[in-house]
Image (spheres, grey):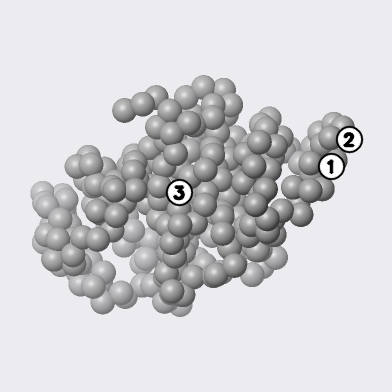
Amino acid sequence: MKKTFLTILFLLALTSNQVFSQNFYAQIQEVTVQEGLNSEYEEFEKFWSVVNEKLIADGHLAGWSFWKVNPESNDNNPWADYILYNQFSSEDQMNSTLSKSPEWWTEYVEKAHKGKSKRSLIKKYVKETLDNKYKERLVTYNISNVAAFADDKLQPAVGINAVYIGMEQLNEDYERFETEYFQNRHKGNKLYWEFNKITNRSDNAYKPVTHNIFEVNMENSGQDQESSFVDEMMGKYGAASRTLHGWMVVELLEFKF
């Protein structure tokens, strides 16, 4: 495994301001939970975290994380309650894992929990998965990473906050502005930053967004940076290459890698 391979989200901060040269793939799931079932749903995902750990060990998945959305996000108008981030080492791995049958998953869940959970609990959660008990709405985006970096001050842990941002590309220069200008401006202000292109989405997904950004800010990251005339022009034309459609602050609840 290459040193630059990002196994889950930002969890391998290998060197200061490292730029990851090997792109990764992921499916991001935006979950809206049935009213009053948040606590039960979080326990449900803890059950599934054991399955995800085995998926990673068996080479079906590269990393998994589970995030809770701050309800004050997006000016008190978040579009989901939770984010699930399923990361893959390649597009082939992603397509293979996501195409498994319900029968395969049922058998695999039982294998993952064998000797760890009571059979009655396994049957309960398998049934709840098949019945879709908790998810009122599920929106999925398949993404291909374009660029990412992590600062060596990053300390991944349950409770860390990140920002999930939906962007729309307005012209052909957008990706170059993000990767060749904004990425460098973020160093020293962000502990982690990743820029992804949406390659596929569920039928109920928001259509205008073309890319998303996932980032972890440093404390006092809003402090002003010195700007030259070139910076001002790059900022001006870079902003004209994109539209921000929304943002959500998310708290890390569980992760496996």
Q: Residue at x 67, y 32 (%)?
A: 184
Q: Are marks 3 and 2 in contact (CB under 8 Å)?
A: no
Relative horizontal placement of residue 245, taking residue 205 as reference (left or right): right
Q: Residue at x 56, y 59 (%)?
A: 210
Give the residue pinned by disc 2: 229
Q: Nearer the viewer, residue 182 or 249?
A: 182
Circle 2: residue type: Phe
Q: Are marks 3 and 1 in contact (CB under 8 Å)?
A: no
Q: Dividing the image into 4 quarters, which one contains the N terminus?
A: top left
Q: Are marks 1 and 2 in contact (CB under 8 Å)?
A: yes
Give the residue pinned by disc 3: 144
Q: Nearer the viewer, residue 120 or 179?
A: 179
Q: Residues within 10 Å of mark 1 (few under 14, many from 20)?
A: few
Q: Dividing the image into 4 quarters, which one contains the C terminus?
A: top left
- On the question of residue 129 being in view, the answer is yes
Give the residue pinned by disc 1: 233
Circle 3: residue type: Ser
Percent coordinates x, y for residue 124 in the rendering: 19, 69
Relative horizontal placement of residue 87, taking residue 111 as reference (left or right): right
Q: Residue at x 23, y 66 (%)?
A: 125
Circle 1: residue type: Met
| Vertical side of 242 occupied by 175: above or below | above
Percent coordinates x, y for residue 10 in the rendering: 48, 38
Q: Earlier in the sequence, mark 3 or mark 2?
A: 3
Q: Nearer the viewer, residue 28 or 67?
A: 28
Q: Earlier in the sequence, mark 3 or mark 1?
A: 3
Distance CA(mark 1)–CA(mark 2):
6 Å
Residue pushed farthest top? 15
- On the question of residue 154 being in view, the answer is no
Which quadrant holds residue 256?
top left
Distance CA(mark 3)–CA(mark 1):
29 Å
